[in-house]
Amino acid sequence: MHLKTLIPKSEARKLVVQRRNEVGENELRRKSRQIIERLFLTDEYRFAKTVHCYISSRPGEIDTRMLIDLMHGEGKSVVLPKLNKKTKSFRRFNFIDWNSIVQNSEGYWEPKLGMDDDLCDVDLIIVPALAVSQQGFRIGYGGGYYDKLLGTTFAPKFVLAFEFQLFEYIETANKDPRIDKIITERRIITTRKV
C-alpha cells in the first residue's frame, strides 16, 4: 500500500515499525533473499569491484550479513562503516571475516577498527533506510551520518527495502541526498526517472 500524500518523517517511521511487526521472521528472510537476487541483476552491482555496505543490526532489516558473505565469496571487496563518534562520521574497514566484527555499546555490529574514510575506490554504496520515497529520499535512524557520507562520493547509491518501507512521497529537506535505486522484493525503482 502506497500513500498518495506527503507524509511526515515521524509518521513514516511509525507506519514502518507497525508494518514490520505484522511480518514474520521467515517471511522477512524470504523477502531479503528476493531483494538480494534483484540487486545481483543490476549492472551497477555486476560491474562493481568494491561495494560499501552496512551490517544489519536492527529488527526487520534486510539481511546484509548474507549479502556481505555472498559478495565476499564472489571476490568483491566489501567496505564496512565504523562510526567515529567524535567526528560524527564513518571510517572505513575492508571486510576480511566476521572475527573482526564486534557489537558496540549501542548494540550495533561494526568493525573493531576503522581506517581512512576515502571512498574514491567504492563503486556502489548500499545505504540503510527505515523508510524511502519513490523519488529516492530516505529516512534513516536519526543520526545524519549517512547523509554526510553520501555527500562525499559519486558512486551509485542503492537502498534495499521491503515494500512496506516504501512510500510515494516523504517529507524532505533541500539538503537530503537522493538515492539512485530502490530494490524491493517486487521491483527495482530507478529514482532519477521519477
Image (spheres, grey):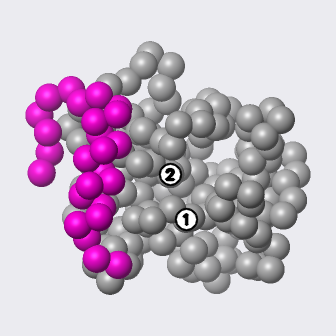
Residue lying farthest to the top in this orientation? 174
Nearest to the observer: residue 43 or residue 90: 90
Q: Which mark is residue 56?
A: 1
State the residue position of label 2.
128
Residue 173 relative to residue 123: left or right: left
For the C terminus, which image quadrant? top left
Q: Can see residue 132?
A: no
* Secondary structure found at label 2: loop
> Residue, x 74% and y 57% (percent of image)?
105
Q: Amino acid at mark 2?
A: Pro
Q: Residues within 10 Å of mark 1 (few under 14, many from 20)?
A: some
Residue pictured at 32% horizontal, 83% vertical: 26
Looking at the picture, which amino acid does disc 1 mark? Ser
Measure the C-alpha gap from mark 2 to mark 1.
Answer: 8 Å
Residue 168, horizontal then vertical, whole percent? 20, 37
Q: How many marks?
A: 2
Q: Residue at 55% across / 65% down in the picture?
A: 56
For residue 173, what is the image quadrant? top left
Magenta residues span: 1-25
User: Is 74 on the left-hand or right-hand side of 163?
Assistant: right
